[in-house]
Amino acid sequence: MIFWSIKVIRKISKTCNDFILILGGRKLKKTLLTVLFIIFVMIFVGCHSIKEEMTILDSITQISISHSEGYGGLNENYFVSLNNSEVVLSFEEMLKGAKKVENADNRLNLDYDILVQYKNGDTHGLHLFLGNEDEESEFMYIGHEDTIYKVNPEGTRKLRKIIK
């Protein structure tokens, strides 16, 4: 990103060089380049400080839950499938609030697999480690187990109500 920013600044500088020299000389050129560089640095820093949340492809229409058989696969022997709009909306909001943790240690004993079905027909498979009351729970996309999404204790309470 920084390399790209410097490249863009150089291109702008080259294109505007004659115009800048006519208006105010080298001092204006240095000032303009400094301002442009500061703007690009602010954009770069701002984009990298955003905490990523789970990707929701569309409105969730149904969630199906099964006991997990381990990492990498989805157990399709669901013990419950839920399409109640109130429950599904609560689950969707809880997922939207989950915070991404990069390079996570997936040493967890998984509790559940969840198939999320969307209005547009797409699906997501999730692994879930269900925390105890007043603890965080952790989700991960099946096939992307190196990244964990943590759900706050309130989300864990919602999950416990949905599952039990």
Image (spheres, helix red, strand yellow):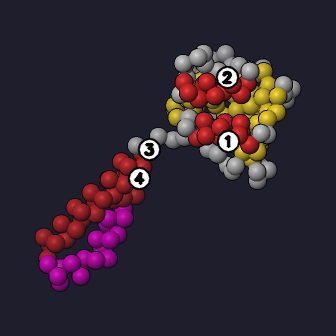
Q: Are marks 1 and 2 in contact (CB under 8 Å)?
A: no
Image depth: mark 4 or mark 3 in front: 3
Q: Residues within 10 Å of mark 3 (few under 14, many from 20)?
A: few
- Is residue 16 in the magenta section? yes
Q: Amino acid at mark 2?
A: Arg
Distance of mark 2 from mark 3, alpha carbons? 29 Å
Image depth: mark 4 or mark 1 in front: 1
Q: Nearer the viewer, residue 9 or 100?
A: 100
Q: Position of residue 115 (x, y in %)?
A: 76, 35
Q: Earlier in the sequence, mark 4 or mark 3?
A: 4
Q: Amino acid at mark 1?
A: Leu
In this rendering, the answer to whether 89 lies above or below 73 is below
Q: Quadrant of residue 61?
A: top right
Q: Which residue is rendered at x = 16% and y = 72% of the image?
A: 28
**What mark, if any, has residue 89 been given in the picture?**
1
**What mark, if any, has residue 160 been given in the picture?**
2
Q: Nearer the viewer, residue 124 or 1?
A: 124
Q: Which residue is rendered at x = 60% and y = 25% of the image?
A: 156
Q: Which residue is rendered at x = 69% and y = 19% of the image?
A: 110
- Is residue 68 in the magenta section? no
From this viewpoint, is residue 162 visible? yes
Q: Earlier in the sequence, mark 1 or mark 3?
A: 3
Q: Residue furthest front?
A: 86
Q: Which residue is mark 4?
A: 1
Q: Amino acid at mark 3?
A: Ile
